[in-house]
Amino acid sequence: MTVRINGEQRELDGVTSVADVVRSLVEQAERGVAVALDGDVVPRSAWESTMLRDGARLEVLRAVQGG
């Protein structure tokens, strides 16, 4: 399946959840991570149960501290 993650097209094997992608991108996803699927925010409580489909657009954003 082909999906776009943070603007980059990627090929994923099989059924993949939002949580799977977040774990592959962010070492510690406990705090400061937000996810949008096809323009809609996905609540953290739904990451495991939200499956990606072919052609999906996923944005994974991490808040960073600095100044």
Image (tube, grey):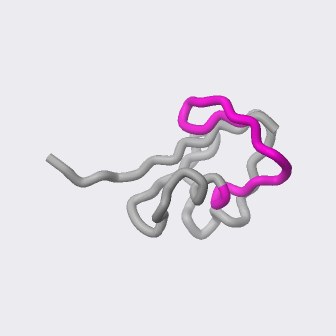
Residue 25 in the image, given as x and y percentages of width and height: 54, 51
Q: Give the camera-side residue of 39 and 56.
A: 56
Residue 15 sits inside the magenta stretch: yes
**How many numbered marks appear?**
0
The reply, left or right, for residue 44 in relation to residue 31 is right
Q: Give the camera-side residue of 13 and 6.
A: 13
Give the residue at x 49% y 60%. Answer: 27
Q: Quadrant of residue 43?
A: bottom right
Residue 57 in the image, given as x and y percentages of width and height: 64, 37
Give the residue at x 54% y 36%. Answer: 6
Which residue is the extreme one toward the left? 67
Residue 65 sits inside the magenta stretch: no
Range of residues picked out in magenta: 3-20
Q: Quadrant of the N terminus?
A: top right
Give the residue at x 56% y 30%. Answer: 7
Q: Give the camera-side residue of 17 and 10.
A: 10
The reply, left or right, for residue 35 in relation to residue 2 is left
Give the residue at x 76% y 43%. Answer: 12
